[in-house]
Image: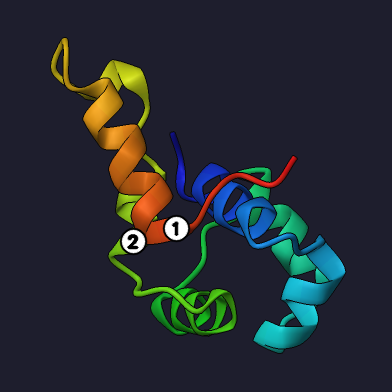
Amino acid sequence: MKIGDAIVEVRTRRGMNQRALAAASNISPTTLCNIETGKSQPNSSTIQALTDALKIKPSYLLIAALTQEDVDEGKWEMVKMMKDYLLGPKQI
């Protein structure tokens, strides 16, 4: 998973839309859209602004970015539980 996908995952877990996260991060909705779709990469200050608005530590984006393909066989369930614990449950 890429950083943009991780931001989408955390944002949706928080029940936020792009406009709300962009406003809370003080970045434009277009910039956020470009980051989430992989058209651009955020710099460190943008990552900090996004994670502050999402109320997570920047390192949690690395956890959010993990996919089943990244994890040793048999450990995915543990990783999913860790993601739910650190990032909050998925919104339905």
- Residue found at x 86% / y 70%: 19
- In the rendered view, does 91 fall on the left or right side of 44? right
Amino acid found under the numbered disc labelled 2:
Tyr
Amino acid found under the numbered disc labelled 1:
Leu
Q: Which residue is mark 2?
A: 60
Instruction: Using the image as rendered, state which of residue 16 and residue 27 is in the foreground.
Output: 16
Q: Where does the image place residue 62, in percent across and percent down from the top left?
A: 31, 52
Q: Is residue 6 above or below residue 1?
A: below
Q: Quadrant of residue 48?
A: bottom left
Q: Is residue 13 above or below residue 54?
A: above
Q: Where does the image place residue 54, in percent across and percent down from the top left?
A: 56, 74
Q: Is residue 89 above or below residue 52?
A: above
Q: Is residue 71 above or below residue 9?
A: above
- Residue found at x 33% / y 61%: 60
Say few, some or many: other residues with alpha carbon within 10 Å of mark 2 (under 14 / 14 to 19 / 20 or more): some
Q: Where does the image place residue 34, in percent across and percent down from the top left?
A: 71, 54
- In the rendered view, does 51 fall on the left or right side of 18? left
- Residue found at x 74% / y 60%: 15
Q: CA distance from mark 1 to mark 2?
A: 8 Å
Which comes sooner in the sequence, label 1 or label 2?
2
Q: Quadrant of residue 68?
A: top left
> Is label 1 in contact with label 2 (beta carbons under 8 Å)?
yes
Q: Which secondary structure lies at badge 1? A: helix
**Mark carried by residue 87:** 1
- In the rendered view, does 3 fall on the left or right side of 59? right
Q: Which secondary structure lies at badge 2? A: helix
Q: Where does the image place residue 46, in percent across and percent down from the top left?
A: 52, 79
Instruction: Using the image as rendered, state which of residue 8 and residue 87 is in the foreground.
Output: 87
- Residue found at x 42% / y 73%: 56
